[in-house]
Amino acid sequence: MVTLDQLVQYAKSTGFVFQGSELYGGLANTWDYGPLGSLLKKNIKEAWIQKFQRETPYNVLLDSSILMNSDVWKASGHVGGFSDPLTECKSCHQRFRADQLIADHDHDVNPDGWSNETMAEYLLTHQVKCPSCGALEWLPIRAFNMMFQTYQGVVLEQANQIYLRPETAQGIFIHFKNIQRTTRRKIPFGVCQVGKSFRNEITPGNFIFRTREFEQMELEFFCKPGTELEWFSTWKNACMDWLTNLGINRDLLAFDDHKPEALSHYSNATTDIKFKFPWGFDELWGIASRTDFDLNAHQTHSKNDLSYLDPETNEKYLPYVIEPSVGVERLFLAFLLSALDEETLESGDTRQVLRLHPALSPYKVAVLPLMKKAHAEQAQEIHQMISKHVDAIYDETQNIGKRYRRQDAIGTYLCVTVDHETEHDQAVTVRNRDTMAQVRVKIDDLIPYIQKETDY
Ligand code: ATP
């Protein structure tokens, strides 16, 4: 696998990812997604919606606001408790997350669920060094709330203080009743949401792995109490299958089932799917069985009945919830890391290939006139025709071999070349990125051919 530095270089030079605010010297840990990156993000989101919503009989979509009534965050526990343990080096005054210092010090130790005192004790007794200056002394650990605050309205006063959402999930919980009523769904059913979340992380970093603004894809699946562990296992496997079906090697993925003592107080099962990033296995996707904690909290605080009445058995209950939650950018990083490859050809030449699943490729097809003068017009027409169906790019600069290499390097799955024969046989040459095999396809058959080859 490539190193993180190599990947950052690749992403910047190809137009997948640019440094945020680069023209003005940047803004720390912000990243913008260029023409290729925007398409990859779109494709990741579409592939998720396809498997977790469109193809299941259970799940529907929601698009709720980033800005919500602050009471939502009081009820959910975020105002009081959405914090990370912050510590500071006594010598250089750099700030760190205490739990991360511990996990980085010993990868076999999982400090989830530890008290601040236990973590402070660990830092001291294990002589954990400041990653910045090497000093050994730490200031007391305190809870640092990660919610971004802002103000709504024209008068800066306490009453108008609101938060940027730190997760999309609460938008789903507060609309549980609206969704159930308007869709006439019976339990079990789920709600999928894709959207931006904001966390004032203490130590963002590792490129796009941890940022303060990111996109989440969350499913809240509502089921009958007693059935939750079965559904937990169903969704856990669905997440793993989604990743491997989209081309990530199973060896690069691992389930990290949380031990009972590391579970949050409201959860009766939690697992993380970890991916082998260049710095080691780290969290990609969190999957938690959250009991009725969230609905119960909103029922209590809003004083609205959020229970479900089973129309067949007349049982009334608060549904239990399974939540698989994943970040689009973390997936983006994992997909790029696992797909970027350098191959030595029989000729001894090397080629860079981005072996993305075609469903994720920014461009499924490149349309190339063999000779610009003779074939450009027809190639442009074919490009127009294909663009009605899939993302396609037209490229007429440099020789055909260079153009193939350029498309291989950005993951384009098929290259369609218009050549001297095309006007006689009404056909084009289609080259496959991975096998480099070429076949002749009639222009009339091109769309179904492309759809079959790039199907997900
Ligand atoms: P961590 O312990 O790494 O801070 P978390 O366990 O708090 O993360 P969750 O609240 O479970 O994370 O978030 C669900 C998913 O959202 C994560 O698995 C990850 O894919 C994504 N995510 C969370 N925080 C960030 C972030 N700051 N930047 C990018 N993605 C994030």
Image (cartoon, helix red, strand yellow):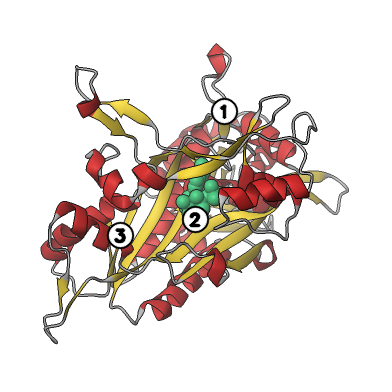
Q: Nearer the viewer, residue 418 or 232?
A: 232
Residue 18's mark? 1
Label 1 CB less than 8 angstroms from ligand 1: no
Q: Is residue 366 visible?
A: yes
The secondary structure type at the circle numbered 2 is loop
The secondary structure type at the circle numbered 1 is strand
The image quarter in which residue 210 lies: top right
Q: Residues within 10 Å of mark 2 (few under 14, many from 20)?
A: some
Q: Identify the amino acid type marked 2.
A: Ala
Label 2 CB less than 8 angstroms from ligand 1: no
Q: Position of residue 165 (x, y in %)?
A: 34, 40
Q: Which residue is mark 3?
A: 294
Q: Identify the amino acid type marked 3.
A: Asp
Q: Position of residue 401 (x, y in %)?
A: 71, 40
Q: Earlier in the sequence, mark 3 or mark 2?
A: 3
Q: Are marks 3 and 2 in contact (CB under 8 Å)?
A: no
**Which of label 3 and label 2 is nearer to you?**
3
Q: Position of residue 393 (x, y in %)?
A: 50, 38
**Which of label 2 and label 1 is nearer to you?**
1
Q: Residue furthest top?
A: 24
Q: CA distance from mark 2 to mark 1?
A: 23 Å
